[in-house]
Amino acid sequence: MQRYFVENIVNNKANISGEDVHHIARVMRMDVGDQLYCCDSDGKVARCEITEITNESVLTNVVEWMKNSVELPINVSIVSGLPKADKLEYVIQKGTELGASEFVPFIAARSIVKWDEKKGSKKVERWNKIAKEAAEQSHRSKIPTVQAPISFKQLISLSANHDYKLIAYEEEARRGEKSNLASTFDKMKTGETLLIVVGPEGGLTEKEVTLLHKNGFISCSLGPRILRTETAPLYLLAAVSYYFELTR
């Protein structure tokens, strides 16, 4: 059954608008009486029945509120050193499927891509569309947020709002570090927030890592192998799912 995101569901009624109207009426060729899922901004999900379709909106009534949660028990923010080409789009799509709460690209010292503020708004709009479509496909109840790239200084400020902060650092893998990721998971409780920083293709500089350590970050390895910038976030999210959803 198709899933769509709405701002809110009031008096057991949901109003679907925007591009989703075209998708429902023209692509899926749904009609009055057909059913779909609606997810509101609080992450609540309802099975709804279409009562009216116009050019601007699809009106629905709630048939049943769904009780099972599909969201990760902890909130994971992926902070990626701005990579080149379409690597970030891949991370957003697959990371959404794996349960990430937020994606924050940042302009690292070794980022090859130069961020163009004038053209940037269209890219951010595309990134958020990718997250929305991936959330629908994977039956998420929430759409992850995707921010415009921030500076390293802004990253430090952002990190103050999170309960736990990690750096996926390849030097820790080379040194054989094995415990920091698992020990962080052991400390975390349902609903807490985890922010993890992944460097760009060239990795993080020693200066960046030192500054992150001074602001409460802990370095960890993601196994003995060196992962690509687009692989590391997915490894972490899979580890979170296994630890918090499959072993408890």
Image (cartoon, grey):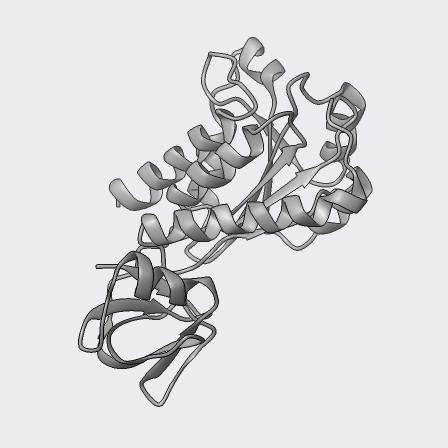
**Image height of 247 relative to 83, above or below:** below
Instruction: Decide which of 5, 171 is in the foreground and name it.
Output: 5
The outermost residue toward the top is 174
**Image height of 92 relative to 57, above or below:** above
Q: Is residue 226 left or right of residue 57?
A: right
Quadrant of residue 114 within the rendered picture: top right
Number of numbered discs: 0
The outermost residue toward the left is 33
Q: Is residue 151 left or right of residue 18?
A: right
Quadrant of residue 2 within the rendered picture: bottom left
The image position of residue 198, as x and y in percent, is 61, 30
Q: Residue at x 79, y 25 (%)?
A: 109
Instruction: Decide which of 192, 126 is in the foreground and name it.
Output: 126
The image position of residue 144, as x and y in percent, is 50, 53
**Placement of the N terminus among the 4 image quadrants:** bottom left
Instruction: Decide which of 39, 211 is in the foreground and name it.
Output: 39
The image position of residue 220, as x and y in percent, is 56, 26
Instruction: Decide which of 212, 184 is in the foreground and name it.
Output: 212
Q: Residue at x 49, y 33 (%)?
A: 90
Q: Residue at x 43, y 59 (%)?
A: 142
The outermost residue toward the bottom is 11
Q: Is residue 41 left or right of residue 159?
A: left
The image position of residue 180, as x and y in percent, is 52, 29
Q: Residue at x 39, y 67 (%)?
A: 21
**Image height of 208 relative to 22, above or below:** above
